[in-house]
Image (tube, rainbow, N blue to C red):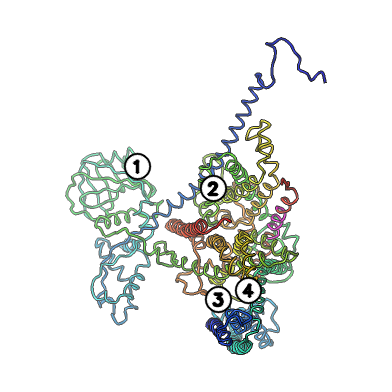
Amino acid sequence: MTDANPSFESADQITDRHTDGDARTRLRRRYAAEFRFKIMGAAAVAVAALFLVGLLSTIVGQAIPAFRANFLQLSVDLSPGNIDPADAKRADYDKIVRTALLAMFPHVTSRQERRAVRGLVSTGSGNLLRRAVASDASILGGTLEYSVPVDDFVDLYLKGLLAERSQYAQLDSTATPSATNGSASLTLDGPALYQLVRSSGHGQTSEDGSIRLTSGEPSYLLEINGGVAKLQEISAEVASVDIYRPLQSAVASGGMQVRVIEAPEAERKISDREIVWIDRLKDDGLIQNHWNTIFFSGGASREPELAGIWGAVVGSTLTMLVTLVLSFPVGVSAAIYLEEFAPKNRWTRLIEVNINNLAAVPSIVFGLLGLAVFLNWFALPRSAPLVGGMVLALMTLPTIIIASRAAIRAVPPSIREAALGIGASKVQTVFHHVLPLAMPGILTGTIIGMAQALGETAPLLMIGMVAFIVDIPGGFTDAATVLPVQVFMWADFPEPGFQQKTAAAILILLGFLVMMNALAVFLRKRFERRW
Amino acid sequence: MLYLVLAIIALAIAAFFVGQHRAMSIVDGAVSQLHSRPGQHGLFLALVSAGPALLALLAWGGFGPSIETALIKSQFAAELSELSIPQVEAFVRDARAIAFGGIVAFSDATKEAAAKAYQAVHSTGTIAVAILAVLIAITGFVFGYRRITAPFRARHIVERAVKWFLILCSLIAILTTLGIVLSLVFESIRFFQKVPVFSFLFGIHWSPQSAFEGAGAEASSVNALAFGAVPLFAGTFLITVLAMLVAAPIGLMSAIYLSDYASSRVRAVAKPMLEILAGVPTVVYGFFAALTVAPFFRRLGDGFGLDVASESALAAGIVMGIMIIPFVSSLSDDVINSVPQSLRDGSYALGATKSETIRRVILPAALPGIVSALMLAISRAIGETMIVVMAAGLAANLTINPLEAVTTVTVQIVTLLVGDQEFDSAKTLAAFALGLVLFCVTLAMNVAALRVVQKYREQYD
């Protein structure tokens, strides 16, 4: 072992392999690796947090607008001429709404425009009015100020989600209109407007220098003489316009305001004419923005402005009731048997393995089970909360059993021995002493299982809870839908108004989940005992 | 029927108090002379009066419909004799629908007659069973009331009944598994009679819309080509791989960071955050994927001049990965924490840095658990439905390009089964065959995950 001995040479030549330059480099490299590793870990947590923030902020941002809605106040004529008080149900409420609406736009004459006016409010307005009359007949017999929901695209515009990018310019030049309504020409005293259009590069310039603005170009809305006109074609002296809001006079204006809507008319769901009309109604104070009661009290609908969440909330409640009533007693009983009574043999091993495996079976397979067994074998009704609850109960059963077993196991044996010692039977021991002590843990597990079931969608699609159901379900065998399925259905609808409704429905679903989990945490913190 | 059940339950409650009172009055309030407590006598009486009656109702609920159907079939045997089996099934289904409300495909005089007969049989049966149940309940009550005496061992009977109830409840788990397996296998066999197993498992064309209805040589030759599930398996595989590429590193690294590096304050924030991520319903992730992530990748692809499908596998896979992160991290966290402190201390004592300890000592020790966690995560990803239904496509492309749209097993199950369906067409049965494959694969992954832990786990204590 002589070659292992350090060789003694001159003192300044002594190099220690733990302190020399190489060692320092190595050490630096190791610390750098250490730092990189730590940063990677922190980055992983940060990325997860980023995902969560992105998810929640997207949904909250989308959902906020859906909680409020715009309503248009109409003076509807409910006099006996329109509605026979003896038979109020049969009256043509759509016509009453239509008449009231058209009365606000006396200048509208052409058929196409009248249809556009009718499209400003929801198609279900007549039905809402009918229901209002049915619930309170005393409003009949005169003129009533009644608020109806506006059409979904109008609503989106009012919330600033359609055609939101506008630019305004104030021009001093005067213009003299040739008419106060319909198509007209403006005689301009200066080239300011022409230059504005020209400098922005919009429109097609013809050989004589005039610019034509088609529907594929940004829109120019001119506010003159208390009215609004849309620019169609302009040259340095003359502009031809369509007047959407009648002018108060045809004299020369003292300056004008120009509003440029950047999104071309052809590419948005709301026309310039409608924008002008809505702005007018808003200026007149006829459009009110308030809490969206329809969303919180209505059932499903194909029209975004009429679609509500209440049907799904009721459906979810009924389904969860069935799930709770079935899975809680069965789950707790199974846990009691396995923990307290079962002998340790092959059979109980089999049951345990089974329960653990069931917990990992994909939820959609439970849906297939429900379809094959509950619907086709037992011929139970499709789309019913009863069947949905049964399927979800089977799905949550493993969660409840596993949590209950853990809670029962946590009760110390001394409790059992004391009870048995004073003469209680095994059943009495379990039900009078062990179960009450394990109850907080069992309830916590049950609530968490129910929260999972509340968010579950896939198995319910299999048993037909995806059907389009307008009515609020009234019982366990009525056709119904539940919150997550409603989210799924709304997410599929093409109307942009449903996007906000979907996000709002998600927010409500998440609200329920947060409440349930908070309750579970509270139970755990308040009642759980450490032995 | 519901009122009958409620009435019987009311009877049971009444019987409890009657029994309790009877037991007390037998011994003139001297409870110590009774063998069992008065409450146990009450329970005994409630049990014998309501139990058999409820069992009878349950049996009728389970077997009633099939008995009714059998009766109808025998009544209309002459009309049904020349129909094939699926036609008979359709006839019975339509008759039921006419009788009890539902959607009817075609109605004719025979079906109307059958529906009338159905209603008659149903109402007669219901009334008969109701009378029977009431009789059983009353007999049970009288019988039980007479049995109550001071030395009567009510406690033993009640406790045995309770125990049997507990056993029954724990058997429900087995029954569920059995129900899943039987219904999947049974329907799959019917599917494989129409489409050969081989062409289902190894065919590379999936187009159930072009499938032929009915029987015959032509139908089976077309169907054999329409139900090749390989594109679905490939799509599922692709999305699962993408999901794991996101979830495995992020989940594992955050588990390591939280268990070994993070201060307790960071942990107090980060752990609930991961739990929230785990508690978000999958339909919400699906909405997020379809609304935000998919358009984002599309725009990103446009920026690079790539053509990204609006329902790309990438978006679905990545969002699914996000969903699985908390699953991976919480399982790995448990595993990493269960590595004994002595191993860490030993490694530090040799001069290793923290990351060296983790990479060279802790991860190898925790490897079986981590592998098992990853396998459970993969099985979750394979079985996940809503994200892919909302964000992945329907077109069965056989591709490994994540920028294209692919479809998965779960998406196809949903597509085939949602909406109006005929229960015995090849299309709906194909969903059950896919379900069987899904069930087998996830089960195999779970069992394998358990085996890995059992086989390779180091015992430190």
Q: Nearer the viewer, mark 4 or mark 1?
A: 4
Q: Earlier in the sequence, mark 4 or mark 1?
A: 1
Image check: A16 left or right of A86? Answer: right
- Other residues around mark 1 within 10 Å, as few (<14) / some (14–19) / many (≥20): few
Image check: A203 left or right of A46? Answer: left
Q: Please name whichever residue, A30 or A108, is drawn nearer the observer in this view of the structure.
A: A30
Is residue A384 visible in the rendered structure shown here? yes
The circle on residue B103 is 3
The residue singled out by tag 2 in the image is B271
Residue drawn at (70%, 52%), measured in percent from left and top? B449
Q: Position of residue B390 (x, y in %)?
A: 55, 56
Chain bearing mark 4: A
Q: CA distance from mark 2 to mark 4?
A: 44 Å
Q: CA distance from mark 2 to mark 1?
A: 67 Å
Residue drawn at (52%, 68%), measured in percent from left and top? A319
The residue singled out by tag 1 in the image is A206
For the residues labelled 2 and 4, say whether their Cβ atoms are less than 8 Å apart: no
Q: CA distance from mark 4 to mark 1?
A: 71 Å
Q: Position of residue A449 (x, y in %)?
A: 56, 61
Confirm whether circles 2 and 4 share one chain: no
Q: Nearer the viewer, mark 2 or mark 3?
A: 2
Q: Could you say which quadrant of the image residue B354 lies in?
A: top right
Amino acid tagged 2: Lys
Q: CA distance from mark 2 to mark 3?
A: 50 Å
Chain bearing mark 3: B
Q: In the rendered structure, which segment of residues is drawn in magenta?
A: B439-449
Image check: A322 left or right of A174? Answer: right
Q: Earlier in the sequence, mark 2 or mark 3?
A: 3
